[in-house]
Image: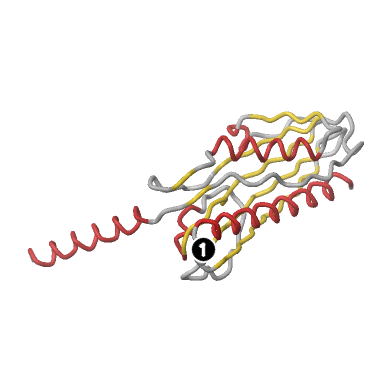
Amino acid sequence: MKNAARFATIALLFISNAIHAQKLYVWCPKEQLITPRKNFLEHDTLDLVIFDGRLLTKNSKIECTSENTVNQLAEFIKATYPSAVVNLLPSSNYYKDPIKNHITVKVGIAAYHAAFGADVKVGIGSVGGSFSYGVIPEGKWNALTAYALKVYDYRGNKEDKHTKDISKIASKPNMLGYSSAKSCLNTTYMEANQEMLFFIDEALMK
C-alpha cells in the first residue's frame, strides 16, 4: 500500500510539473492596415466591450499584456468606424444587457497566443460560444486567435442580435525559432480581425 501511495504521489507531481512546464508566448501584433468605413454608422453610438478570457500559464513569455491586447484591438475597431461614436466600456459589461438605442459589440478573446506543439491548447479560455480548432500539429509552432463575437443592434425600435465564433490557427516548423511563432500569431490575428470586421459590417448594414 505504501508503494502504491508513493507511486500515486510521484505520478501527481509529474502531471503537475508537466502542466506548469507548458509555456505560452504572447507578442503584440504588428500594425494592421485599416480600410475605414467612412460615413458608415455616422453619429451612431457603438458601445464596445472586450473581455480577455485567456488562461495564460504563470511561466509564459508575455511581451503584450492583457491590457495592451485589449487596447490595441479597441483602437483598431475605433479606427475602422471613424464616423461612429465608439465608447470602450469596462470588461465587466461583457455579461450585462446592452443599452437601448445603442449598438453594442462584445468581443470575448478565447485565444491569442502561441506555443510549441499541443501546448497551445492550454491557454484557450471560456468566453461562451462553440469553437473548432481542428488538429493541432505536434513538433511545430502553433498559434491561435479566437473570438466570441456578439453584435447587438438596438437602434430605434430594433433589438437584433448577431453572434459568430471566429477561430484561426497557423502552424510553422521550428526553423526560425521565436520568429516562426511570432509570424504564426500575427497571421491568425489579422485573419480573425478581418473576419470580425466583415461580420460587424454585415450585421449593421441590414
Q: Residue at x 67, y 56 (%)?
A: 166
Q: Is residue 109 above or below residue 8?
A: above
Total labels: the figure holds: 1
| Residue type (three-letter) at the residue carrying disc 1 | Trp
Quadrant of the snapshot with the N terminus: bottom left
Closest to the observer, 113 or 102: 113
Circle 1 SS class: strand
Closest to the observer, 204 or 33: 33
Q: Which residue is mark 1?
A: 141
Q: Residue at x 39, y 56 (%)?
A: 22
> How far from the left and from the top, in percent, is residue 38?
90, 38
> How far from the left and from the top, in percent, is residue 132?
60, 63
What colour scheme has been applied to the protein in the rendered image? secondary structure
Q: Residue at x 87, y 36 (%)?
A: 41
Q: What is the crowding at mark 1: few (fewer than 14 residues within 10 Å), some, or many (at least 20)?
A: many
Which quarter of the figure has residue 64?
top right
Q: Is residue 37 above or below residue 191?
A: above
> How far from the left and from the top, in percent, is residue 197?
77, 48
Q: Is residue 28 above or below residue 18?
A: above
> How far from the left and from the top, in percent, is residue 198?
80, 52
Task: Name the residue furthest right.
Answer: 39
Q: Residue at x 85, y 38 (%)?
A: 158
Task: Name the residue furthest left.
Answer: 2
